[in-house]
Image: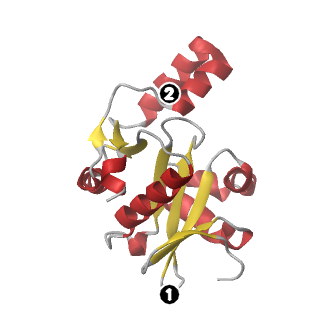
Amino acid sequence: MGNREIYASDESYKLCKVSEEDKENYIKLLKETTFMPKFYDNQMYCDIMWKGAMEGNTREFSIFDKNENYCGNIVIKYSWTEHPEIGIDIVGRYRNQGIAPKAIKMLARKAYEEHPVPYYFLRVSSQNLHSKHVIEKLGGVLDDTTEDLFLKHIRNVFGEEKYKEMIEWAKEQADDEVIYQYRYLPEFFLK
């Protein structure tokens, strides 16, 4: 595994801080899981996404199994806030093997030790019913009261008019997709 910095681990999986060794796998995974894979045919776009993973305001981790196979990526966004968000992408051939729930719980528990919060946000597309089920099985509680921090940032940077244009454009692209937002409470990941 080289000189990877292990953030959290159990008997089955390791969450390692994203390193240069992960770039190819990371970009392949983004291309596999995005609704616009053509973006990742552009090297400049790939480089921007990679730089964001390495230097951005998110904390990115690669997921490895006990045989050191790259299984996916898990991220904690807005970790300095009262309600950080956890996101996860699993490589296709490793989906439906219980990796996501274990990795989410492991990350939430470790991050909570460092910075206790009332809950984490987990978001999922209405077109991804399997992941919705996983989040609900983890104990996620549906929440529709809080605006996404990224959208707040967009509104602050671009202003109300541009924000509304971007929201309308996103709705047109979404093909009736809805994003469900859940609260993931400590009572579920600390047990």
Q: Residue at x 50, y 41 (%)?
A: 84
* Percent x, y of residue 152: 55, 24
Residue extending farthest to the top is 161
Between 169 and 86, the residue placed more toward the observer is 86
Q: Residue 101 falls in which quadrant of the image?
A: bottom left
Task: Determine which residue is flagged by label 1.
Answer: 67
* Percent x, y of residue 158: 66, 20
Q: Can you say whether 184 is above or below 105 in the image?
A: above
Q: Is residue 34 visible?
A: no
Single out the mark in the foreground, 1 or 2. Answer: 1
Residue extending farthest to the bottom is 67
Answer left or right for 24 relative to 44.
left
Question: What secondary structure is found at the residue carrying circle 1?
Answer: loop
Question: What secondary structure is found at the residue carrying circle 2?
Answer: helix
Instruction: Measure how far apart labels 1 and 2 are at the Cα level.
Output: 43 Å
Classify mark 2: residues with Cα within 10 Å, few (<14), some (14-19) or many (20+): few
Q: Residue at x 60, y 70 (%)?
A: 25
Amino acid type, callout 2: Trp
Answer left or right for 35 relative to 41.
left
* Percent x, y of residue 182: 34, 40
Amino acid type, callout 1: Asn
- Residue 169 badge: 2
Q: Residue at x 62, y 48 (%)?
A: 58
Q: Residue at x 37, y 69 (%)?
A: 95
